[in-house]
């Protein structure tokens, strides 16, 4: 794992990616610190962090697009497979390398609150828990990007899909308020989500039978549940969407709440997508 | 050293490798031959653990590649068809990375890297980025990566592709030198190379093993292709009459003689079977010489063309349904 980690980390700085990512994020942090803290004199460092968070939309796809896709393109995955390394070691090595790159601009965030504190009264607790949430959110999105990158050998496709997913996750809560909250609409929304999920499964497994069975079973369960307890569906779609939105979880931290469930959720997403990446890379050996 | 048993690999409905079984002995060089799409690369990928098999087992030095992949893989150095190189690293960085991933002890990494660079003559490019190297150098970096850490088994998929003749000779002698303490499997399209380097040849076609023998045995067993070319200074009818006499007195078997005439030189070709013509106590070449010399016809050229591996390869692979055609432009009489 250490060899993979070192190689991935140096690869970010053998080309421009690592430098551009760090410089860009540091520049954005600078702008918001100047605007909120220096010009307007707000003592709320979390404002800076919550605005910088938006730029994950651009930086995460750039950071993650090549991580597995390039190995496939250059056929270096054959080297990795033939070395005495497990898939878990390979994927974790890659993930930790990205985690380190992701951490570089965070160092700036960590240094700033005490400096600003000299000139005013910064709520250090909120500031640091926001930075923590910012980093955890970044790791979770990175894990998703890692998984997307493992699905294709086209870096551009990986970047685009990751961008769409991060964007969707960013806008999800806001858009979901346009879905009517009554129980029938919730039911329809879930039915559509199941349909979409089954189409994705069909594309990934190329097995019509399996996806049809999953689709049938899931829709039947949903219908049964809806028939038994209609009232439970009242506003459920909104709850679920805000429940799974990564950005929503980070917002709690920015509002001054150290949300343990949020931490657990971030960690779960990270573990889930690392696991899925391992499976998707193993699958390549089986096809 | 390597044992492959009933190996089968399906890609969807297409069978790439079909019930392949063979053994690879220690400290020998094995040549892996087959027409395009015969399943060579697939088999090599399975042996090295890059691909899974649909059925069958592969064991390397007693370790099953599917059951104990770490132990099995640590015995193998593999160079795939396209050398798996990180273009953004220098040669030395790349080899150090491979060494570390192969779990070579930290202290011995520099010396291990140095020694493979010396073997593959890469020392003068060690600090250059791999993407700036020529194809031949890239290939050599790939080979260096494969033999790094002295794995007992070295598997090379078309190792000399893209090299210039001088480099090919160097790499061949390198491969030959590996024999001392490695087992080598190499695939190649260049049959002369396999013939020259390998101790044993495995020919597969359509995913099936169709030959497993030494190059000498293969060529002699299937030596239908051996030919005796003779050029004499005489016209066609003289040659015909001399050869007709020869057939009635010397050999009970009628010989097909093919024949070309240019100016006053006639040349013809006789299919030449070693066991028929030399082993039974006499050599047909003596008879031909005597017959022509009696008539005062000088033999300008007599040349025995032994069956080459190409012919054996063509014969074997065409027998199993592959589309191969041998084109001759000679007329028969």
Image (cartoon, rainbow, N blue to C red):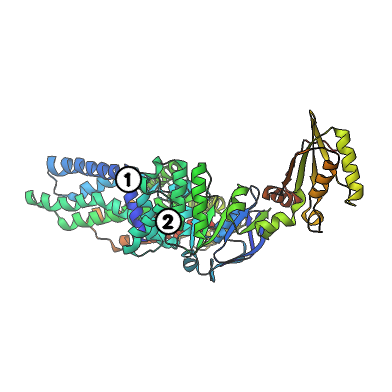
Picture layout, residue A117 above or below residue B325: below
Q: CA distance from mark 1 to mark 2?
A: 48 Å
Please state the chain letter of the residue tagged with numbered disc 1 in the rendered image: A
Picture layout, residue B215 above or below residue A52: below
Name the mark nearer the viewer: 1 or 2: 1
Query: Could you tell me residue A204's position as x and y percent?
Result: 54, 52
Q: Secondary structure at mark 2?
A: helix
Q: Secondary structure at mark 1?
A: helix
Q: Is residue B159 left or right of residue A172?
A: right
Mark carried by residue A236:
2
Q: Viewer-proximal residue, B65 or B274?
A: B274
Mark carried by residue A14:
1
**Location of residue B130 by image quarter:** top left
Q: Quadrant of the C terminus of chain B?
A: top right
Q: Quadrant of the N terminus of chain B?
A: bottom right
Q: Residue at x 50, y 69 (%)?
A: B68
Query: Could you tell me residue A269's position as x and y percent?
Result: 38, 58
Query: Could you tell me residue B301's position as x and y percent?
Result: 74, 40
Of mark 1 and mark 2, the one earlier in the sequence is: 1
The crowd level at tag 2 (other Cα within 10 Å; few <14, some 14-19, many 20+) is some
**Location of residue A231 by image quarter:** bottom left
**Location of residue B5 by image quarter:** bottom right
């Amino acid at each position: 794992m250490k060899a993979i980690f070192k190689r991935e980390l140096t690869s970010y700085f053998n080309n421009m990616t690592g430098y551009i990512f760090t410089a860009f994020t540091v520049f954005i942090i600078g702008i918001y610190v100047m605007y909120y803290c220096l010009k307007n004199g707000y003592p709320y460092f979390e404002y800076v962090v919550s605005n910088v968070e938006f730029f994950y939309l651009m930086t995460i796809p750039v950071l993650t697009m090549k991580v597995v896709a390039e190995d496939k393109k250059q056929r270096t995955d054959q080297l990795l497979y033939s070395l005495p390394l497990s898939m878990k070691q390979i994927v974790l090595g890659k993930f930790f390398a990205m985690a380190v790159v992701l951490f570089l601009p965070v160092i700036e965030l960590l240094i700033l609150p005490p400096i600003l504190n000299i000139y005013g009264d910064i709520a250090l607790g909120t500031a640091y828990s926001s930075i923590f949430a910012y980093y955890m959110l970044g790791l979770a999105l990175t894990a998703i990007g890692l998984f997307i990158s493992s699905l294709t050998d086209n870096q551009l496709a990986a970047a685009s899909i990751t961008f769409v997913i991060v964007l969707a996750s960013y806008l999800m809560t806001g858009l979901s308020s346009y879905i009517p909250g009554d129980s029938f609409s919730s039911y329809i929304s879930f039915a559509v989500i199941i349909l979409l999920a089954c189409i994705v499964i069909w594309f990934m497994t190329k097995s019509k039978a399996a996806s049809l069975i999953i689709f049938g079973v899931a829709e039947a369960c949903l219908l049964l549940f809806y028939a038994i307890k209609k009232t439970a569906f009242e506003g459920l779609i909104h709850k679920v969407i805000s429940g799974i939105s990564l950005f929503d979880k980070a917002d709690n931290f920015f509002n001054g709440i150290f949300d343990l469930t949020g931490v657990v959720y971030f960690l779960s997403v990270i573990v889930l997508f690392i696991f899925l990446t391992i499976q998707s890379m193993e699958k390549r050996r089986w096809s | 050293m390597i044992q492959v048993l009933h190996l089968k690999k399906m890609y969807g409905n297409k069978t790439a490798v079909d019930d392949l079984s063979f053994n690879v002995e220690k400290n020998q060089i094995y040549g892996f031959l087959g027409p395009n799409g015969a399943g060579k690369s697939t088999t090599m990928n399975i042996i090295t653990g890059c691909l899974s098999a649909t059925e069958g087992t592969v064991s390397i030095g007693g370790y099953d590649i599917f059951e104990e992949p770490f132990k099995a893989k640590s015995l193998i150095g593999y160079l795939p068809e396209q050398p798996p190189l990180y273009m953004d690293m220098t040669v030395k960085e790349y080899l150090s990375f491979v060494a570390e991933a192969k779990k070579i002890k930290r202290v011995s990494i520099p010396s291990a890297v140095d020694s493979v660079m010396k073997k593959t003559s890469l020392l003068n490019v060690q600090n250059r980025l791999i993407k700036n190297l020529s194809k031949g150098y890239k290939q050599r970096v790939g080979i260096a990566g494969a033999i790094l850490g002295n794995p007992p088994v070295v598997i090379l998929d078309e190792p000399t592709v893209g090299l210039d003749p001088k480099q090919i000779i160097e790499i061949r002698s390198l491969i030959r030198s590996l024999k001392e303490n490695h087992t080598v499997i190499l695939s190649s399209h260049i049959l002369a190379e396999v013939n020259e380097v390998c101790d044993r040849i495995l020919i597969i076609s359509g995913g099936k093993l169709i030959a497993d023998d030494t190059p000498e045995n293969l060529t002699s067993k299937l030596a239908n292709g051996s030919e005796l070319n003779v050029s004499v200074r005489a016209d066609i009818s003289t040659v015909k009459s001399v050869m007709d006499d020869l057939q009635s007195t010397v050999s009970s078997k009628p010989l097909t003689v093919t024949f070309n005439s240019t100016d006053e030189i006639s040349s013809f070709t006789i299919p030449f079977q070693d066991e028929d013509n030399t082993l039974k106590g006499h050599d047909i070449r003596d008879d031909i010489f005597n017959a022509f010399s009696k008539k005062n016809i000088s033999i300008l050229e007599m040349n025995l063309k032994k069956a080459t591996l190409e012919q054996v390869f063509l014969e074997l692979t065409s027998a199993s349904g592959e589309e191969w055609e041998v084109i001759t432009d000679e007329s028969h009489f």
